[in-house]
Amino acid sequence: MLKHLILSGCSLEIYQGLLLTFHTNNLRLKDNKFHSGLDSTSRSRILVPLIMLFAIRQSLTQNLLTWATMKRCADMCQKVGQPFSIQTFDLQLYAVAQQVKWDRPSEFKSHILRLGGFHTLSCFISSIGKIWGDGGLRDLLVDSGVYAAATVDQMLAGKQFNRAVRGLTLLYETLKTLWICSFFDWIRQQKCLEIPESLL
C-alpha cells in the first residue's frame, strides 16, 4: 500500500513502513540518502544517512529487550561512524538501561544514557522538597494560602509538575524581593548611598 504524505512543505512516499522518496526544496531522498538536485544556484550534492526506528510493541521493562534496543542503537551508530551512541529514556527505562550497562561494561563503554528532561526536572524538584521541605518550604507554601497541604506534599514529591514549577518560581521571586528590600534597608542604615523612596 503506497502512501503519499504532505508534511509542512515536504513530500513523503511510504510503502509498507519504508520511506521511498522525500522531496523538499530540490532535495530528494532515495536509498535512505538525501540527494540535492543540480540547479544553476547550487552544484553541490548532499548525502545524509537516514535511520528510521519503528515502535516496539512489547514491554521494555525486561532487561533482554532493553539490551537489544541498546545493542541495536550502538550498532547503528557504529555503522554510520559515530563513536558514541546516545539514548534518552524515561525514568523507569533509564533505571533498567543503567542496570544493563553496569552488567555489560565492555559492551556499552561508549554508550551514553540520558534521562529525559521532564523526569530530570521532576527529580530535581523532588530533591528540593527532600532537602528544604521540612526546613520551612512546605509551611511557607501552605501558610501563604496559595496551595493546600496535600497539594504541597505532592508538589515537593515531584508529582504535580506544573504547580511545583509555578510555586517554586513564586517562592523564588518573593524571596528575591525580600532580599533586595533588606539590602536597601541595610544601605540606608549604613548611609552608604542615598536611595530614593520610590524604589522601596
Image: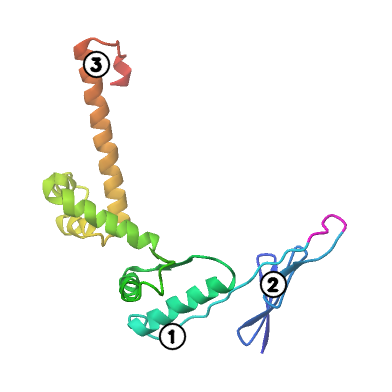
Look at discs 3 and 2 and give the one toward the viewer.
2
The residue under the point 17% across, 58% down is 153
Q: Which residues are magenta?
A: 40-44
Secondary structure type for disc 2: strand
Mark linked to residue 92: none
Residue that sits furthest to the right in the current view? 40
Evaluate if marks 3 and 2 touch, with contact meaning CB atoms under 8 Å apart.
Answer: no
Kindly identify which residue carries mark 3: 187
* Front-lying residue, 172 or 88: 88
Callout 3 environment at 10 Å: few (<14), some (14 to 19), or many (20+)?
some
Report, in whole angstroms, how far the alpha carbon at label 3 lies from the one at label 2: 66 Å
Residue 96: percent from left, percent from top: 32, 75
Q: Main secondary structure of the magenta part?
A: loop
In the picture, residue 102 is in which quadrant?
bottom left
The residue under the point 67% across, 67% down is 48
Residue 31: percent from left, percent from top: 70, 78
Kindly identify which residue carries mark 1: 57
Q: Is residue 193 left or right of residue 153?
A: right
Q: Earlier in the sequence, mark 3 or mark 1?
A: 1
Look at the image and tell me in which quarter the C terminus lies.
top left
Callout 2 environment at 10 Å: few (<14), some (14 to 19), or many (20+)?
some
Is residue 42 part of the magenta span, yes or no?
yes
Report, in whole angstroms, how far the alpha carbon at label 3 lies from the one at label 1: 65 Å
Kindly identify which residue carries mark 2: 33
